[in-house]
Amino acid sequence: MDRAAGGVVCHDGAVLVVHRPRYDDWSLPKGHLNRGESWEEAALREVREETGVRCAITSAPYPVSYLIASGVPKLVLFYAMAPTKVPKRLAGDPSEVDEVAWWDIADAVRALSYETEREACAALTISHLRRRSSAAG
């Protein structure tokens, strides 16, 4: 089984998304676990590498699974995240992503390229908004 981890980074009503030219898709930042790396460490590293944004995890993982093109099953754990600092310029590893953007939550839930990521985005942004609401009130 292939394993990856990623993040649903929420800030000011928006979600951080990346465009990957290799696949010509808009997706959530994610990537493979390195040897000896925890799911959480991998998720934080991948978000930082693909977007330039350092984050803190704010949720339990949301698992998605699917078959990749070769027929191998893949498990991805997504975590809700909050930026610890928002850089003036978003920039990721140009060998992996050519565009990084903040999308309105509703746009992200509707327009991400993959259904599994749209579902993870919806679930984790709702969780993020509930936490913010209960912390404020």
Image (spheres, rainbow, N blue to C red):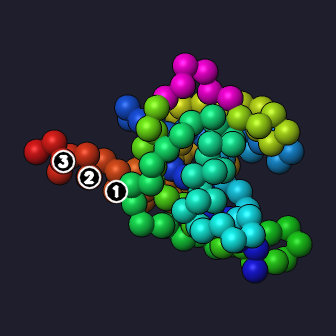
Q: Residue at x 44, y 54 (%)?
A: 57
Q: Which residue matches tag 1?
A: 127
Q: Where does label 3 land, which residue? A: 135
The residue lying furthest to the left in this view is 137
**Residue appearing at x 71%, y 35% in the figure:** 92
Q: CA distance from mark 2 to mark 1?
A: 6 Å
Q: Is residue 29 left or right of residue 131?
A: right
Q: Judge the density around disc 1: few (<14), some (14-19), many (≥20) Cα neighbours within 10 Å.
A: some
Q: Nearer the viewer, residue 135 or 37?
A: 37
Question: Image point 61% across, 46% down: which residue?
Answer: 47
- What's the magenta bit mostly, secondary-structure-wise? loop
Q: Of helix, strand and loop, which one carries label 2?
A: helix
- What percent of the width, then of the height, locates residue 25? 74, 44
Q: Secondary structure at mark 3?
A: helix
In front of the other: 41 or 9: 41
Q: Are marks 3 and 2 in contact (CB under 8 Å)?
A: yes
The amino acid sitting under disc 2 is Arg
Q: Is residue 74 above or below residue 78?
A: below
Checking the image for residue 33, the label placed there is none
Q: In this figure, which residue is indicated by the disc labeled 2?
A: 131
Q: Is residue 87 magenta?
A: yes
Looking at the rendering, the stretch of residues picked out in magenta corresponds to 86-91
The three-letter code of the residue at mark 1 reads Ser
Label 3 Cα crowd, 10 Å radius (few <14 / some 14-19 / many 20+): few
